[in-house]
Amino acid sequence: MNPETVIVKLAESSKDWADYLTLAANVLGPLLAAIFGVWILLITKRIEHSQWRNQKLIEKRIEVWDDVAPRLNDIYCYCMRVGAWKNVLPKDVIDWKREVDRKIHTYRPYYSAEFYTRYMAFMSVCFATYQGHGVDAKLKTPLDEHKSAHANWQGAWENYFYEIPLDEMELEGRYLDLQRQLSLELNVM
């Protein structure tokens, strides 16, 4: 074989390779674009689903909070002796605690562990719990001030109060901590 024949064959074979590369690029280009497009679509759908789920979670948190917030505020007002606390019986406050506890415990998975911790901290300032089997929680608000505010005070109501009253500054702080945590849970801050 002479050198000119080898050069011609190499030129022809490189032309074939160029055709093959062009063909591969024409096939792989759209295929890779389609795979990339599907990948982007899946990521977009996952983000949309995550946003939808977070929106529903926040809506549920708001729904639960709208239900328990007035009672928590009533408990706070009774313990601090502000607002309409004089019109409330001690047994009613204990019943409110049960009502709020039931809802918070039922919907606990919708909130963070930090929210639950702050809720329990607030309630532990207001109430002495675990006083014995079948014994209601006791109010930690000052008994004497409640006695003097009710003209129709009944001696049996004293059983609803704990002997050591709460620290009002701590109560204020725990209530605000709970509200701040809720703001974080709702992405308000």
Image (cartoon, rainbow, N blue to C red):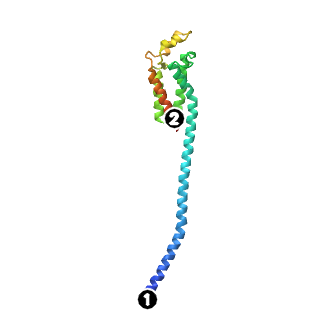
Q: Which amino acid does label 2 sit on?
A: Ser
Mark 1 / mark 2, whichever is N-terminal:
1
Q: Is residue 111 above or below residue 159?
A: below
- Residue type for callout 1: Glu
Residue, x 47% and y 81% (percent of image)?
13
Query: x, y percentage for residue 14?
Result: 47, 79
Per the image, label 1 sits on a secondary structure element best described as helix
Give the image location of residue 97, x and y in percent.
Answer: 52, 23
Viewer-closest of 13 and 77: 77
Residue that label 2 marks: 183
Viewer-side residue, 61 vs 182: 182
Q: Considering depth in this image, is 180 or 19 the residue closer to the camera?
A: 180
Q: Is residue 154 visible?
A: yes
Q: Which residue lies furthest to the front in this view?
A: 189
- Estimate how packed mark 2 is, as few (under 14), some (14 to 19) or many (20 or more) residues with alpha carbons within 10 Å: few
Mark 1 vs mark 2: in front: 2
Q: Position of residue 121 (x, y in %)?
A: 45, 27
The reply to whether residue 109 is in sight is: no
| Front residue of 156 and 181 | 181
Question: How many numbered discs sit on the rendered protein?
Answer: 2
Q: Which residue is label 1 attached to?
A: 4
Q: Quadrant of the N terminus?
A: bottom left
Spatial CA distance of label 1 from label 2 is: 83 Å
Tell me, yes or no, whether the two marked residues, 1 and 2, touch with CB atoms within 8 Å: no
Q: Where residue 65 sits in the image (x, y, percent)?
A: 56, 31
Circle 2 sits in a helix, a strand or a loop, which is it?
helix
